[in-house]
Structure formats: structure tokens, C-alpha cells
Image (cartoon, rainbow, N blue to C red):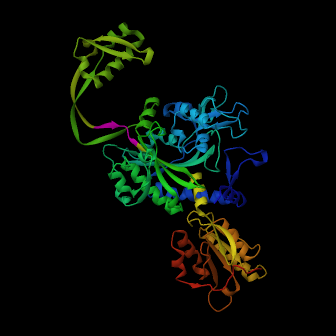
Amino acid sequence: MAADALAELAKRRGFFFGSNGAYGGTAGFYTFGPQGAALKRNVEDAWRDRFTIREGNREIEAPTVMPEAVFEASGHLEGFDDMLVECPECGESHRADHLVEDATDIEDAEALPGEEVAELIADNDIACPACGTELAGQPVEAFNLMFATDIGPGDAQPGYLRPETAQGIFVEFPRLKEYARGNLPFGITQIGPAYRNEISPRGGLLRLREFTQAELEQFIDPEEDEPPLDRVRDVEVRLYPATEQEADDGDYLDTTVGEAVDEGVIGSPWVGYYLGVAQEWYERVGVDLDRFRFRQHLAGERAHYAADCWDAESEVDGDWIEIAGFAYRGDYDLSKHDEYGDDAFTVFKRYDEPKTVERATVDPDMSVLGPEFGGDAAAVAEALETLAERDPDAFDGETVTVEIGDGDDAETHEVDADVANFSVEEVTESGEHITPHVVEPSFGVGRTVQTLLAHAYSEDEVDGEERTYLSLEPEVAPQDAAVFPLVTNDDRLTALADEVAADLRAAGLAVAYDDSGSIGRRYRRQDEVGTPFCVTVDRDGIEGDGPDTVTLRERDSAAQVRIPVAALADELTALREGEPFASVADRYDAVDTDVETAGN
């Protein structure tokens, strides 16, 4: 399937299209049409069902604008960059690593240093895609991807549109831990928009400036908490470890989650668990597993906070695209916010039995420190307390040396040991404060939608006529069914069709109604938007002594069965929840007549 064929279908049938077309369009922004919005919402609901409800997690919804201090603490102000190269002739900006990937066999130029990317641009005679000017010698610079804004009028507080939903969870941890009663492990999920000022948006829904993420932050005690790995131990996965990517003859590793964790291929059992859960979920919503893999990040592309990271990748139009990331973030996020924020980002871990321990303490004599150190007295006292915890032996001499301040501003002071009032006391402790570690599965919803459309796109022939259809799973298809009166010049058929559609909607099913054109054309329209089942009201179903019946048609096989109207809602609900059409068909009579070519 060519990318332009899918893009044309997506626009024509109302899945997605470029935004603001009346004003020339805005790169990196897409509008989901009626079909696409429904498909996207169903994907989100399926994700919520698996990663929130079935995992026993809780969902929040945080603001999309956050103050600058949040992103200073998280590291986004300094390190959330892409590589930019600007054309000296036309002034167009481009992602330098993407230019290298498009012109060479290098798959992950993002993992390379900027200087090396600049050399590759020169060595491969890479030119500006817009005007053809060679880019050799042009600097490759870091470009921060966050959208800046002001919070409030006048001397407004600087803020940013969030580049990920995760920080909205992390900054609220002090309150969220209360809802969990301070008990680890617990998980918080969030589905919502994020924003990145992409240098060169491209690929439909693959690289946008506004996009939807579905993220889970799993907070764990790294010393005690283990995932329920046995639930997914036998799930078969296709892995692409970093060692295989770097080898000249590297290849995929087809294994199970359990074997990969046991052998250390996947370093974290928690990451392994979520790879298994994700594999099952992707299969459930319709990703073609023959075009799917988990790729481990190379050292150069791994985020600064991640001890290990794997991407779920799907093949779309010959390219592998990232559709989810699975990172072991350690205690980086909570430690940073604990350092910068005004609240405690730790939890109290209660011991099974109280422990008696020796605790080094100081009680500095401020009547001496004040006159001697002036405005630095409080900082000296705090430094003494820190030193007592870290190195009690430093108080063995007659004086104690402490350092206050950072970097070039650091100052060293000596304090008499008797002024520090150092002592070691026995105390009984019932527990300790620990900083939880974080495991993060992060899913791109738009990228998942595009993958599902690409993998569902099919062409075949029915009754000698070519057709295009989307083989979407019933759970995520934009509509559950479509209802047609076979002809529109029979009031009995149209009245029953209206009644059937209303009853199905009352049962919670998303139903389209179509009475325009031949029945064959109506089937083709529904096939092309992925509607899994069509219901046709015809004269055979209303004439006779028995209950009224309708024809139920399955999209992929075009097989048809006659089914009582009274049973229709229950059967369609069962089909949407995963019951095979063949099981339903076994309970009813197949339709021999060909209504595909019948007209009005």
C-alpha cells in the first residue's frame, strides 16, 4: 500500500486531513474527521481498558500548560532538543538527522552527535529538499522543541505547553501518593494532548506539533516490588536488541518475554512485563504482528533519565516508526522535583519490625556561628548536618571543614568540633522515606491510529468487482454497524430499517444509516471506512409468518446470514466484544441470494 493511497482515503472518507486548509494550512497540525475521531476515541478506550482498568491503575487529567520551573526541574529546558540545519539560500529549516536517514542506510541518526551528522551531510552531498542548495558546511544546531507561552498578563509567569503528559503526573505525586495511601506499587495513567514545535513535520500523523499520548507512570519500590511477570512470561516477542543493531550481521531475536528477562536481554522485569502486555494489546486492536517489533535504544539515543528503553515499532509503507516507548526512568523525575519543588516526593516505607540504629546528629551553637560567619551561619549549620549524615568520622578532629555554595562560588569554612556539638545517638525507627522508581510505557495515539489504518488497508475482488476495505477490529472500528433498507420505495422496509437503527443505537452501538444508491455501492462505502457489519432490511425478512429477520453481512469475507431482528443487538454486541463471526453464523441460516448487486 502506498502512503498516498492511504492519505487520499483518509481525507476522502473523513479519517484525518491537514488543518486550516482555508488559510493555506499549518504544517504539523491535523484534524480528525468523523471517522478518524471515532477510531481514535476507540483506541483510547481500548488502551484505558487495558492499562488503567485491568491493571488496577488510576487516571488523571492535568493541565497542558505548566510553569517554566517544572521544565527546569525536569531537564526539558536544557536537553529537549532536535538537530536543526538551515539552508543558506532559501532559509528553510530541516531536521538534520532526518536528512541523513533519507540519504543513507543509517536508521537512527538521532543517536549520533551533531558534529558527526554535519560531517555526514557533507560527505553525502546532501542538499536542501526545498531548493536543492548543498548543505555542506552549514552548522547543525540544537533546537528546543517546546512551545513557550505567558501565564497571566503584565509581568506574566513564563510557561510552556507540555511536551509530554508525564510531567503532569510527576508534579502531582505528593497528592497522588495520598490517594494510594502511600502504598507502592501504584500506577497513574493519563491520555491527552502534548505539543512539540517540530522542525519539519512529516508523514501524516507520524510527526505532529500537537498529538495525543497515552502514558502510564508506574511507581515502584526498587528493592521489593516485582511485576506479575508470569502473566506474560510465554508471550512471544520479536526483539531488536542494541547489540544486534550494532553487529554487522545483526538480526532479530524471536523469543518469549520470560526468556528475554531471564537471560538479561531485557534488563528490567518491569519493562519486560509491559512489553508483554503491550504485545497482547497491539494484537487485540489490530496491529499486524508480522510488521511489528520491539527495538532497544542505542546508548546515544537513550534519554538522560532512562536506564533502559525499548520502542514498539511498526512497519508502515516500508519504514519502521516508533509507536510507543517503554523506559525505566529510575528515581530521576521524583528526585528532581523533590530538589526543585516545595513538597516531598518520597513515600514512607514502614519496616516489618522497628529497628534500633545509631544516628549521627549535630546541634550547632548558633551563638558562636552567627558572629563568626554572619549571613553564612545558617548555610554552615546545614552543611554540618549533611556532613554528619554522610561522614561521621569527619568530626573526630578538633575542627570540622565544610563547604557551602556550588562551583566557582563554593567557600570552605572551618568550625570547632565542640561548636558543632556532634553526637551519636541510638534511635528506634519504624521506617524510612524512599524515592520511588518509575517505569513508563508511553503510547502515541495518532501513530497507533495511522498504523492500524495502514495495516488494515486491503484490496480484493467481490463478485468480479474490485474493492478497497479497512479490515479494522470491531472494537476500534469507527462504526459498529450500518443499516440499509434494500430499497427505498417500500414504506415497510424503510420503517423497519429506521426502527432497527434506533434500537441498535439505544443498545449503545454506533450505527450508520444509508439509503442512497445501490446496495452494492452502500456496502463499498462502508467497507472503505472499516464498518465490520452491515444490516440489510429486505422483503424476504418481513414476509411470512415468522418473526422479522434481516441480513447480517460481515465485511472481510462478505458472508451473510439471516438473523431475527430481536436477536440483532445482542449478536452485534457479542461480535464487537470479540466473538468470531463464524460462531454467530453457525446459529443462523446463510443467505444464498446475492444482494451485493441488487439495486433500488
Residue positioned 24% across, 12% down in the render: 418
Residue 145 visible? The answer is no
Query: Which quadrant of the figure contains the N terminus?
Result: bottom right
Residue 449: % across, % down: 59, 56
Residue 119: % across, % down: 57, 32
Front position in the image: 204 or 581: 204
Q: Give the main secondary structure of the magenta stretch.
A: strand
Q: Quadrant of residue 497?
A: bottom right
Q: How many marks?
A: 0
Q: Does 52 sit above or below residue 462?
A: above
Residue 29 visible? The answer is yes
Q: Residue furthest bottom?
A: 545
Residue positioned 22% across, 37% down in the render: 355
Q: Is residue 433 magenta?
A: yes
Q: Does 241 sit above or below residue 1?
A: above
Q: Does 521 sit above or below residue 453?
A: below
Query: Which quadrant of the figure contains the C terminus?
Result: bottom right
Residue 127: % across, % down: 67, 37
Residue 555: % across, % down: 62, 72
Residue positioned 70% across, 61% down in the render: 13
Q: Which residues are magenta?
A: 431-437
